Amino acid sequence: MIDIHSHQQRKDIFCVENIIYPLEIDNYNPNTPFSIGFHPYEVDKMDKNNLDKTLSELEHYLTFSNVYLFGEAGLDKQIKTDFSWQISVFEQQLLLNKKIDKPFIVHCVGAYNEIVAIYKKNKCNFPLIFHGFNKKHTVAQELQKQGFYLSFGAALLHNPSTQESFIQADKSLIFLETDAQNSHKIEEIYQKATILAEKGFKIDLAAQIYANFIHLFPKKANFAPVLSYE
Ligand SMILES: [Zn+2]
């Protein structure tokens, strides 16, 4: 079982814990899987004149092999932070990741078109995972058609439109996650997702998600910890 995006670590399953840089960097340890990036919520605290320096500090962590994903980073139209500054920070992170070349986990609120446009303008070709996906099927289809991954979380348990998106989604481009909530464990989300997925056709969802994960990390030498969690 893989939890692709969580804000807390679990030792008994393979869980990619997200670190909001630099706020939570003390949580980093070399033995567990992480994602690290500048979250849009923190972007207003950054020094506009020092972005390069801050990015190179972040780069140091991103090169570590237990940091599986760059992010979460992205754009959020529901926060007050100046949107053009959010775009600058997000774009610089995409550019940095062209060098680092890890899959990139995206926080997106109301800015799907902008994110895809910035990704394409910069000729990126690393995988993008839109996390916490809770939009309708047409949006899901549009993103998956372009090869982007969608990660579904607790919204699958109660939101009919998210459930419909999941049922119809291309399962070779999905992940599951717990994110910041802790009322629902990843097991509960897998259980619900399996019931929903089987409305489409018979599928071993956990095996499919494991295959998706391996597809994302074909060259990584550290599959062993993943296998031992399965
Ligand atoms: Zn998150």
Image (spheres, rainbow, N blue to C red):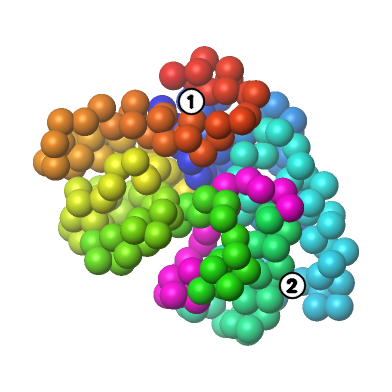
Which quadrant, please, contains the C terminus? top left
Coordinates of residue 120 in the picture (x, y in percent) = 54, 68
Coordinates of residue 27 in the picture (x, y in percent) = 71, 41
The structure residue drawn at horizontal position 20% and vertical position 40%, both measured from the top left corner, is: 197
Which quadrant, please, contains the N terminus? top left
Q: Mark 1 points at which residue?
A: 13
Coordinates of residue 191 in the picture (x, y in percent) = 26, 33
Coordinates of residue 163 in the picture (x, y in percent) = 21, 53
Task: Give neighbour class at mark 2: few <14, some 14-19, many 20+ (Cα, 10 Å).
Answer: few
The residue closer to the viewer here, 137 or 25, is 137
90 left or right, relative to 58: left
Contact check, label 1 and label 2, Cβ < 8 Å: no
Instruction: Residue at the far front: name it.
Output: 123
Q: Is mark 1 within 8 Å of ligand 1?
A: no
Mark 1 to mark 2 CA distance (whole Å): 34 Å
What amino acid does circle 1 point to?
Answer: Ile
* Residue 200's disc number: none
Residue 108 among those drawn in magenta: yes
Residue 36 among those drawn in magenta: no
The structure residue drawn at horizontal position 50% and vertical position 45%, both measured from the top left corner, is: 5
The structure residue drawn at horizontal position 41% and vertical position 54%, both measured from the top left corner, is: 147
The structure residue drawn at horizontal position 20% and vertical position 51%, both measured from the top left corner, is: 168
Q: Can residue 43 be seen in this view?
A: no
**149 lies above or below 192:** below
Kindly state the secondary structure of the residue where label 2 is placed.
helix
Kindly state the secondary structure of the residue where label 1 is placed.
loop
95 left or right, relative to 56: left
Which portion, as a residue range, is magenta?
A: 99-116
What amino acid does circle 2 point to?
Answer: Lys
Task: Give neighbour class at mark 1: few <14, some 14-19, many 20+ (Cα, 10 Å).
Answer: some
The residue closer to the viewer here, 34 or 44, is 34
Q: Name the residue under label 2.
A: 45
